[in-house]
Image (cartoon, helix red, strand yellow):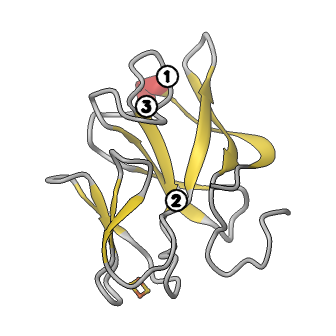
Amino acid sequence: AARVDYPTSRLANIKDLKVNEPMPIHYPDMDSPGVLVKLGARVPGGAGPDGDLVAYSTLCPHKGYPLAYDAKDRTLNCPGHFSRFDCEKEGQQVWGHATQNLPMFRLTVDAKGDISAVGADELIYGRTRNVL
Ligand code: FES
């Protein structure tokens, strides 16, 4: 995937998060909604002391419908044409029409527990290139 660095943006503190309860975020700007989730178990690409923090765009890569989180299987699901993306596998598409995986926002966590987004690994829906 084409990793792209955006300006660093503070999203939350670890203490603000409950396991498997997504927090709405915007990154890298207000036109790009997403979610930040503490999954509760280490995953590929996960950040933080437990390796379980992930953040994703919630604009479906197919046609930009807003994705909804399903806490039962930790997927993001599209109401438009029902694509599904696995939050435990770096946004891999598990079913549907999209032709790319879901953009994952790369995270860093500092000593105080502040979580920041620092980049994206796929093109965010609706953008012709991944720069501000
Ligand atoms: Fe999400 Fe079509 S917009 S599957």
The residues bearing labels 2 and 3 have C-alpha atoms spaced at a distance of 16 Å
Mark linked to residue 16:
3
Please state if 7 lies on the left or on the right of 62 as rendered: right
Taking 88 as reference, is 121 above or below it?
Answer: below
Which residue reaches farthest right?
Answer: 132
21 vs 120, nearest the viewer: 120
For the point 49% across and 47% down, the residue is: 55
Which residue reaches farthest top?
Answer: 111
112 vs 61, nearest the viewer: 61
- Camera-near label (3 vs 1) is 1
If you read the primary sequence from the N terminus, does the residue marked by circle 2 or circle 3 appear first? 3
Residue indicated by mark 1: 48
Residue indicated by mark 2: 34
Residue 28 is situated, as x and y percent measured from the top left of the image, at: 72, 56
Taking 93 as reference, is 28 above or below it?
Answer: above
Please state if 46 lies on the left or on the right of 78 as rendered: right
Q: Quick check: marks 1 and 2 in contact, CB under 8 Å?
A: no
Q: Is mark 3 within 8 Å of ligand 1?
A: no
Q: Is mark 2 within 8 Å of ligand 1?
A: no
Type of residue at label 3? Asp
The residues bearing labels 1 and 2 have C-alpha atoms spaced at a distance of 18 Å
